[in-house]
Amino acid sequence: MQRRRPIKQTISLHHTLAAFAKTACELADALPPGPERDALLRKARRADTASHLRDRLGSTGLQPPTR
């Protein structure tokens, strides 16, 4: 069985998702209102939320309760 060669990530997932969200919003702004535009905006919103997920999970404001 062949082994996969390791791939070095040069851009973090956070930055990749943020760039995709920005590009998708710009493309959606160029489209007329309709289902295609709505789908693109939905994808952009999901990518933006996913890119901020690391910040939300690592926030010091969300600490588990102490006994």
Image: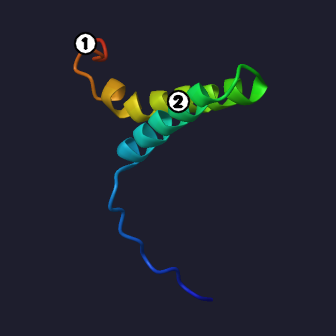
Query: Which residue occupies the extreme right position in the image?
Result: 35
23 lies left or right of 43: left
State the separation of the CA atoms marked 2 and 1.
42 Å
Q: Give the colour scheme shown.
A: rainbow
Screen quadrant of the C terminus: top left
Residue at the spot of label 2? 25
Instruction: Label 2, secondary structure: give it.
Output: helix
56 vs 6: above or below? above
Q: Position of residue 7 (x, y in %)?
A: 41, 72
52 vs 7: above or below? above
Q: Residues within 10 Å of mark 2 (few under 14, many from 20)?
A: some
Q: Amino acid at mark 1?
A: Thr
Residue at the spot of label 1? 66
Number of labels in the image equals 2
Q: Residue at the location (52% across, 80% down)?
A: 4
Q: Nearer the viewer, residue 21 or 34?
A: 34
Q: Position of residue 16 (x, y in %)?
A: 42, 47
Residue 1, picture quadrant: bottom right
5 vs 28: above or below? below
